[in-house]
Amino acid sequence: MNFSLTPEAQAYRATVRRIIAEAVTPEAIDRMHSTGTFDVPELTQALAREGLLERAVPGRGGGDPIELWLLFSELEKAGAPYDGISVALMVAGVINAVGTEEQKERIIPTITSGQALVCMGYSEPDSGSDVAAATTRAVRDGDEWVIDGAKMWTTMAHEATWLILLTRTNTEVAKHRGLTMFILPMDTPGITVAPVHTMGTERTNATWYDGVRVGDDAVLGDVDGGWRTMTVALAFERGVMGGTNAGVPLLRHFRAWADEVGLLDDPTVRDHIARTAIDNQVAALLTMRAAWIAATGGLPGLEGSMVKVFATEAYQRAARAFQEAAGPEGLLQFHEPGAAADGFVDYDARHSPVTTIYGGTSEINRNNIAERHLGLPKARS
Ligand SMILES: Cc1cc2nc3c(=O)[nH]c(=O)nc-3n(C[C@H](O)[C@H](O)[C@H](O)COP(=O)(O)OP(=O)(O)OC[C@H]3O[C@@H](n4cnc5c(N)ncnc54)[C@H](O)[C@@H]3O)c2cc1C
């Protein structure tokens, strides 16, 4: 297997690196952590101007399939705020896979031009892992649908133009068969957004839907076929668009600090560094596989689960080990004098647990691997 990049892919990567260097300033990273909004409009728009968002939509881009991996790997390695870009491109890929021609023409260009962000309303207060148990109701009323209910963890809802919303349209059939996905503007009357701040600095939201009215043009996929749309969305969410290389900036920050304070000769510290470097390499290879499958029109449902479990758990292990090795300085936050790695050791220790939860917990992804790869019996109905 030859893993070296073609000259064209190297040129693509150089462009991505240039844009990141220009748009992702220390101030932008600081803003991301202080506001909890992991998005920088200047970055999204610069990528859009060079056509890089259009090329990154799964199943749509005309470039080398390795570009999808390169884009998110570079963003993540730089510690760039990329959640907004990631969710928007993921949903563009879902629209491309299951949307109508009219939806593709109306919605995808608003995303690939860097103007519109998207948020995902799947999880509810009482259904996260068991997302098919969603109770937010969409009921037919003449030519329209009326939506009522509540969602939890609707990240980016306070910035997004579009919302992708999982609803129950049929209560008479098995839970997976009575769901319908909608895509609608966030400024549709009847939607309320309230902030939820997390220990990893990221802001997410609780959202409510009170008599929200939409037409048939908002149905994404088939009526009562929302589970199929959901599986496409999850296949793009895991291991394809970021979230699996976070150990790289962590290692870079920790190693530089350990060198500065004379910890690099400590055998335990060296062991942690070496293990993390190896885990980062494995995570990169697994990510490359999932991203390649998505970029060539496939659905890496299983491969994405594999990389998500491995990479997020390795990141969490590394963050804990580095925090322990750093001692009290590892508990100091950004802008506190003496903070290990300028506060990144503390930040990664608080942020890494979250990565094993969103996009499906480690347990749910392990169940997926057990059932689909190892052929073990189903864990739930
Ligand atoms: C920061 C953040 C951002 C998020 N962003 C979004 C978003 O934008 N949109 C969105 O829709 N959701 C989002 N989520 C929600 C996320 O997908 C859910 O939190 C996650 O799927 C777990 O659901 P839950 O929180 O309801 O936990 P639960 O489902 O209640 O799980 C609790 C525990 O039980 C375990 N468990 C549950 N079922 C099983 C099982 N069958 N087998 C073994 N163990 C099981 C879980 O692994 C977990 O440890 C976000 C979450 C966080 C923390």
Image (cartoon, rainbow, N blue to C red):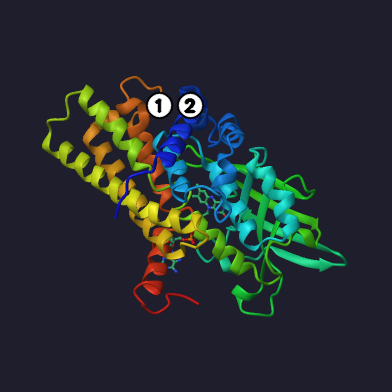
The structure residue drawn at horizontal position 43% and vertical position 43%, both measured from the top left corner, is 70
* Distance of label 2 from label 1 (alpha carbons): 9 Å
Q: In this view, does 153 lie to the left or right of 193?
A: left
The percent coordinates of residue 10 (x first, y second) are 40, 38
User: In the picture shown, does residue 98 fall above or below 53?
Assistant: below
369 to 338, vertically: above or below:
below
Q: Considering only order in the chain, which callout, 1 or 2, is on the residue closer to the N terminus? A: 2
Residue 198 place in picture, x, y as percent: 49, 42
User: Taking 76 as reference, is 184 above or below it?
Assistant: below
Q: Name, please, the residue furthest toward the right.
A: 142
For residue 19, above or below residue 154: above
Residue at which label 2 appears = 30
SS at mark 2? Answer: helix
Foreground disc of the pair 2, 1: 2
> Residue 150 lies in what quarter of the image?
bottom right
From the top left corner, tell me how far across and down residue 59 is, in percent: 56, 56
Instruction: Determine whether, in the image, residue 27 is placed left or right of residue 332.
Output: right
Q: What is the three-letter code of the residue carrying label 2?
A: Asp
Q: Which class describes the residues within 10 Å of circle 2: few (<14), some (14-19), or many (20+)?
A: some
Which residue bears the numbered disc 1? 334
Q: Position of residue 12 (x, y in %)?
A: 46, 38
Residue 84, can we see it? Answer: no
Q: What residue is rendered at 48% in x and 26% in y? A: 30
Question: Regarding mark 1 in the picture, which secondary structure is present there?
Answer: loop
The single residue placed furthest to the top in the displayed view is: 337
Q: What residue type is labelled 1?
A: Phe
Q: In which quarter of the image is the N terminus?
A: bottom left
Residues at badges 2 and 1 in contact (C-beta under 8 Å)?
A: yes
Q: Label for residue 145?
A: none
